[in-house]
Amino acid sequence: MAEGNRHLGYKDVLNAIEDRSPGAKASFLFGFLDRAHDRFVDDADDERAALRECAVCGSPTTGDVCAFCRLRDRVGAEAAAVPSARAKPELATATMSALDSVVDVAPPRRR
């Protein structure tokens, strides 16, 4: 977002190449991953060893509860603490229902 950021120029160049040759960006990315994969295997294995299942949803996490479930609990607690939600329990229920619909649509990805 800073003026003069070089990465914006790189992005423009990659987009121009993609316009002239559709699939060029995907080819570049997958080619890089194929060539670099072996360099990251040891680090990935170490990081994977530190993972366990979230006690709530079963997604991979480094803690007992994943960040998604902690956020969901925090949003629920904050919705319940809003004075208008206390005065109108249906508001808190509607807030949680809206949150639940988002959760149903986009649950945490399991690996």
Image (cartoon, grey):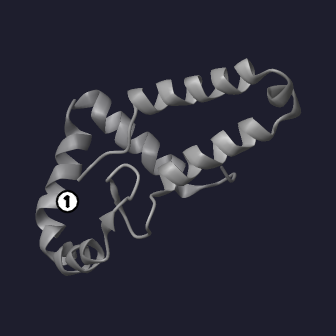
Q: Is residue 71 left or right of residue 66?
A: right
Residue located at (23% from left, 51% from top): 29
From the viewer's perspective, is residue 8 above or below residue 85? Answer: below
Residue drawn at 44 percent across, 50 percent down: 10
**Residue 47, relative to residue 107: is it above or below?**
below
Residue 6 at what x, y percent from top left?
A: 54, 56
SS under mark 1: helix
The percent position of residue 14, horizontal first and vertical second, equals 36, 43
* Front residue of this view, candidates 32 and 43: 43
Which residue is more in the foreground, 42 or 29?
42
The image shows residue 89 at horizontal and vertical percentages of 75, 23
- The kind of residue on which mark 1 rests is Phe
Q: Nearer the viewer, residue 94 or 86?
A: 86
Percent of width and height locating residue 78: 74, 43
In the image, taking residue 68 as reference, residue 28 lies left or right, namely left
- In this figure, which residue is indicated by the disc labeled 1? 32
Crowdedness of circle 1 by 10 Å Cα count: few (<14), some, many (20+)?
few
Q: Is residue 5 left or right of residue 12?
A: right
- Front residue of 43 and 78: 78
Q: Quadrant of residue 81?
A: top right
The residue located at (40%, 70%) in the rendering is: 62
Q: Please tell me whether residue 7 is drawn above or below residue 82 in the rendered image.
A: below
The residue positioned 80% from the left and 28% from the top of the image is: 85
Q: In this figure, what is the number of numbered marks?
A: 1
* Relative vertical location of residue 77 with respect to residue 53 in this rendering, above or below: above
